[in-house]
Amino acid sequence: MPDTEKALAHHAAHAASYLEDLASLVRIPSVSFSGFPEVEVKRSADAVASLLGRRGFENVEVLTVDGAHPYVYGERLRDAKAPTLLLYAHHDVQPPGEEGAWKTPPFEPTERDGRLYGRGAADDKSGILVHAAAVDSWVRGAGEVPVNVRILIEGEEETGSEHLSTFLRKYRARLDADAMVLTDTGNFDTGVPSVTIALRGLVTVDVEVRALRQSVHSGMWGGPIPDPALALAKMLATLVDAEGRIAIPGIYDRVRPLTADERRSLSRLPSTDADFRRQVGLVPGAQLLGGRPPWETNWWQPSLAVNAIQASSRRDARNIVNDVAWARVGVRIVPDMDTKDVTDRLCAALRQAAPWGVEVKLDVAVAGAAWKTDTAHPAFGAAFRALEKGYGREALAVGCGGSIGFVEPFSKELGGVPALLIGVEDPYTNAHSENESLHLGDFVKATRSAIHLYGELATALERS
């Protein structure tokens, strides 16, 4: 029996135990946001380290830098002549959101209708298990992995990887590789394998508008005084036009036109506007914006969103004029757009739009670059072949409207080695929202694809 077939057979025989490994990680509420228990993220890192040690990795360590949630590192370096892969995923998760909107508790993994529900079940603890199960299947089923592997599991991806540069300076020597494999993206649809070749970047700015030293009675004082919530609303409304396109002057100056290959890839997508509306859950009367096919707009055009807005709260609503209003504004940027240029233009537009002499305070929260890769490297051919074998259908090259702060700096730091972004999410995953879930059939197929991938890359990256 070929070695790959032995690894696949081992996975088939032990798939249930890998699923239980995933469930055990989902039970840990490893929310990396400020205000949530840091001890749970540390407990998650320890659990991941234990898992990797059981699943074929050696020299497993929890790695730390000051101020950051812990990373987990492991390796299996057995053949100096074989290529080396750097495997990546993250163990931190988003907050649960409105817990009352979950059909089952967010940190009690629950199987329902062929999916595993729970915060982090897909984003991105499934990614950890795809790597771990594939390595374990090669080691226990075939005797050895055909490539050397290093694995890095991050603990602060969901908060923007803000200590990544510090981590790189401290641990750079452990990260040399011939290719990176990152399982933190999604498939175009359930059962449709995909390689993500572009990510949008992200600039976020917190804007605070103040008109009063304290909130006041809206009847006794309302009328002559500026309402900061209305002022903020007027400011935000100037940022987009009637078609939903960003209206900040010069924001589109650096947006590159699509190449012929990118247009061909878009034309091959098995999707319609109706599919897009259904997948995102758009209400019947709401329009699709941007004036382009929705996936072109989502992958290859910048977009603006108000991520949060607050003056008082629904629970504490009173008959007052609020003293202050706050919002977080996020701009997703595409390749060639510069983070500083976008930040400067966004801040200038907000200040210019401020009415009535209100005070405006701006703080830059995140500024991460976009990323795009060239698929000519033989590692990509290996990835497409592996996915086709694992899923039983041709894989697509897709963009992603989201951002992964890890990819662009790591790719640069490692000298531009190919970065293969292959995930397990699908349009129904609800990542970052309530009722996040993982399609269990795709979890199996993704792991089988990873098993094939190690064999394909052993040949594609073979050193002469």
Image (spheres, rainbow, N blue to C red):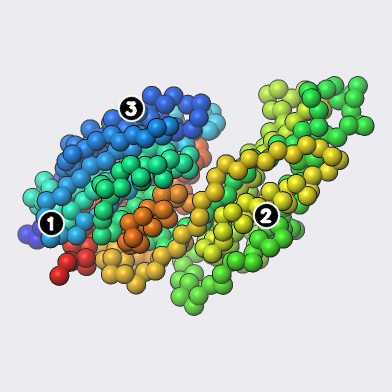
- Asked if residue 437 lies left or right of residue 335, the reply is left
In the rendered image, residue 238, in percent from the top left (x then y), is placed at 76, 52
In this view, the residue in front, 457 or 342, is 342
In front here: 426 or 217?
217
Whether the residues at callouts 1 and 3 have beta carbons within 8 Å, the answer is: no
Q: Which residue bears the numbered disc 2?
A: 345
Q: Secondary structure at mark 2?
A: helix
User: Which numbered disc flags the more N-terminal residue, 2 or 3?
Assistant: 3
What residue lies at 33% left-to-right and 27% top-to-bottom?
43
Circle 1 Cα neighbour tier, 10 Å, few/some/many (<14 / 14–19 / ≥20): few
Q: Is residue 53 above or below residue 259?
A: above
The amino acid type found where label 2 is placed reads Arg
**Which residue is rendered at x = 36% and y = 55% of the image?**
413
Quick check: 464 left or right of 101? left
Q: Position of residue 283 (x, y in %)?
A: 63, 49
Q: Alpha carbon of mark 1 to alpha carbon of mark 2: how far?
A: 50 Å
Mark 2 crowdedness (10 Å alpha carbons): few <14, some 14-19, many ≥20: some
